Amino acid sequence: MGSGYMSQIRKHYFLDEYCIIAPGRGKRPSDYLGDVLEKETSDCVFCKGHEEKTPPATAVYKEGQILQDSEKFRIKDWDIRCFPNLYPALIQNPAKVSNTEFQAMEGYGFHEVIVETPKHSRQIPDFSDNEILLLMKAYKEQVNYYQSLEKIKYVSLFKNKGERAGASIAHTHSQLLALPVMPPTLKREIQTIKSSETCPYCNILVKEYGSNRLLYRNEEFIVIAPYCSKVPYELWILPQRHIHHISDFTDDLLRFLGDAIQVSLSVLSNSIGDLPYNYMFYQLNDDPEYHFNVKIQPVTSIAAGFEKNTGIYINTMAPEKAVEQLKTNLL
């Protein structure tokens, strides 16, 4: 890599955030440690046939239908299964908060698991076109439902793959948390967006469409390694039209979103192995000035003292170099 990349402090496209690009501290792709995927196990509570080991499903997706379990009956034949987390971060009947020294509120909300397939070892890159479309439809339905509830201010949809990314169960799944508060990061972002003359994400599309950070595009989405990448091989998925929430997605848009996610994860897997990762959906249902996006962050290292002290991430892989490597595995 040229000397121009030897340690740069880069600023976020439009937020007051920074990262340090320090390729001299980097590793080869083979040096990153992947998680060992569990083989099929008779003990996995997410596997088909173990439905009684989880709470009743709030939504079961099967052959175009959306069904529900009851306390006494579990649907055994399913494609995607959504149910309350056994160990929820938020609950519907929290104890009243009283006599607190500082500000606090009841831990009200919803915490749901979305099991993406009944097959234990199957991953998103292995999904058929119909399977990935169904998953995107399930995301849309579940987000819309929880977003419609009176006390809910924000629905966080995300996936942790691998133990180092926060997953406690190997069977592929996503999670959803419905919160009674708006996350501060989203508050700051939308405030900056509202103060801009044009949509910052639309500006990113214009600037990155022909750049050496563009990894992939289909008819509706582009995938880039952002200029201000926090971690090696970080990817952003952006719709090419301005759209603020998944509730406005047609089936065609969902299909192209699923394609962009699947291609991104396949390329990452083929390039750097079975690394753990997180992906997160960012959207605001009641603010059309926001621009929907998905961020994928492989877990290549841990946030250490500097990152925690400053909020500035040291990234050992310039995004331009990451895309150069990833494109060699783009079919």
Image (tube, rainbow, N blue to C red):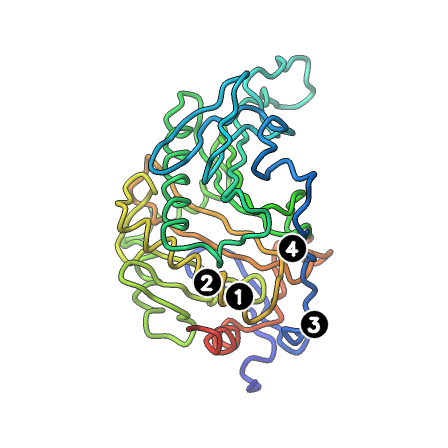
Task: Tell me the element at label 2.
Answer: helix
- Is the C-beta separation of discs 1 and 2 under 8 Å? yes
The residue under label 4 is 310
For marks 1 and 2, give the CA distance. 6 Å
Task: Tell me the element at label 3.
Answer: helix
The residue under label 3 is 31
For marks 4 and 3, give the CA distance. 27 Å
x, y (%) of residue 65? 35, 32
Q: Earlier in the sequence, mark 2 or mark 3?
A: 3
Q: Within the image, what quadrant is residue 317 found in?
A: bottom right
Task: Tell me the element at label 1.
Answer: helix
x, y (%) of residue 71? 54, 17
- Please give the name of the residue rendered at 58% of the width and 34% of the height, measured from the top-left corner: 49
- Is the C-beta separation of discs 1 and 3 under 8 Å? no
Q: Depth-wise, is mark 2 or mark 4 nearer the camera?
A: 2
Q: Is residue 191 visible?
A: no
**Image height check: is 78 above or below 319?**
above
Most foreground residue, 138 or 232: 138
Q: Which quadrant would the N terminus be assigned to in this image?
A: bottom right
For marks 1 and 3, give the CA distance. 14 Å
Amino acid marked by disc 1: Leu
x, y (%) of residue 96? 61, 12
Task: Tell me the element at label 4.
Answer: helix
The residue under label 2 is 264
Amino acid marked by disc 3: Asp
- Please give the name of the residue rendered at 58% of the width and 48% of the height, measured from the top-left corner: 160
Q: Residues within 10 Å of mark 4 (few under 14, many from 20)?
A: few
Q: Earlier in the sequence, mark 4 or mark 3?
A: 3
The residue under label 1 is 268
Most foreground residue, 51 or 268: 51
